[in-house]
Image (cartoon, grey):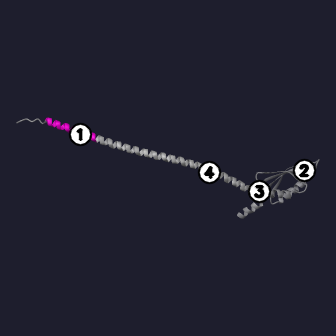
Amino acid sequence: MTRINLLPWRETRRLNKNKEFYVALGLCMAIAAGVGFTGFKFAEDKVNFQAQRNARLDYEIALLQEELQAIRALEETKNDLLARMEIIQQLQGLRPQIVHTFFEIAARIPDGIYLTAMKQSSGKRLQLDGYAESNARVSALMRRMDRSDYFTNPTLDVITSNENQSISTFKLSLEQNNPKADKESEDDI
């Protein structure tokens, strides 16, 4: 019987199998690296795309912020103009009242009283300074002002008499009314 040595064939087959295994392993590693690299690039592209979208949104937000500031400035200007218009309308409404005030004062002053100053304070309060021939004339002035539709609550603040010249100086304060405005507000109710 001849003896056949099969060891070199087995050794060759084992080396071939190892080579095939390493080639398959290399191919699997290359495929895995390719898939990993492709996934990394895909994720990087998604991140870059989102960064571009965020940059665009930031730009648009900055534009909108500028527009909002412009709108706020316009609203402030509008509110200032409305406030001015309201003040002008109030002054226009008070214009006839000034005429009535002077007319009523001229009509209500009795003989012997001379006004030296007239001052309006706190909206409806009016102060009259002057001198009179006697204290009775000041009392007559207060009664006449109290009967007026345009004046109420006459109050004598100061009265001083000068006995040498028989002249009294006085300060009288009273409140102004606007009877037409009162009637309109009652009609509105």
Q: Tell me the SS state at disc 4.
A: helix
Disc on the earlier residue, 3 or 1: 1
Closer mark to the observer between disc 2 and disc 1: 1
Q: Determine contact: label 4, label 3, CB under 8 Å.
A: no
Q: Amino acid at mark 1?
A: Phe
| Front of the two marks 2 and 4 | 4
- The image quadrant where one finds the N terminus is top left
Which residue is labeled 4 in the image? 74
The prevailing secondary structure element of the residues shown in magenta is helix
- Report the residue marked by disc 2: 168
Question: CA gap, disc 3 to disc 2?
Answer: 33 Å
Q: Is residue 183 left or right of residue 66?
A: right
Which residues are drawn in magenta? 7-27
| Type of the residue with mark 3 | Arg
Q: Which residue is located at x 88 percent, y 55 percent? A: 139
Q: Where in the figure is residue 127, as x and y percent of width and height?
A: 82, 51
Marks 2 and 3: in contact by CB < 8 Å? no
The mark nearer the N terminus, 2 or 1, is: 1
Observer-side mark, 1 or 4, equals 4
Q: Which residue is label 1 attached to?
A: 21
Q: CA distance from mark 4 to mark 3?
A: 31 Å
Identity of the residue drawn at 70% across and 55% down: 86
Q: Quadrant of residue 178?
A: bottom right
Percent from the top left, x then y, of residue 40? 37, 43
Alpha carbon of mark 1 to alpha carbon of mark 4: how far? 78 Å
Residue on which disc 3 sits:
95
Q: Amino acid at mark 2?
A: Ser
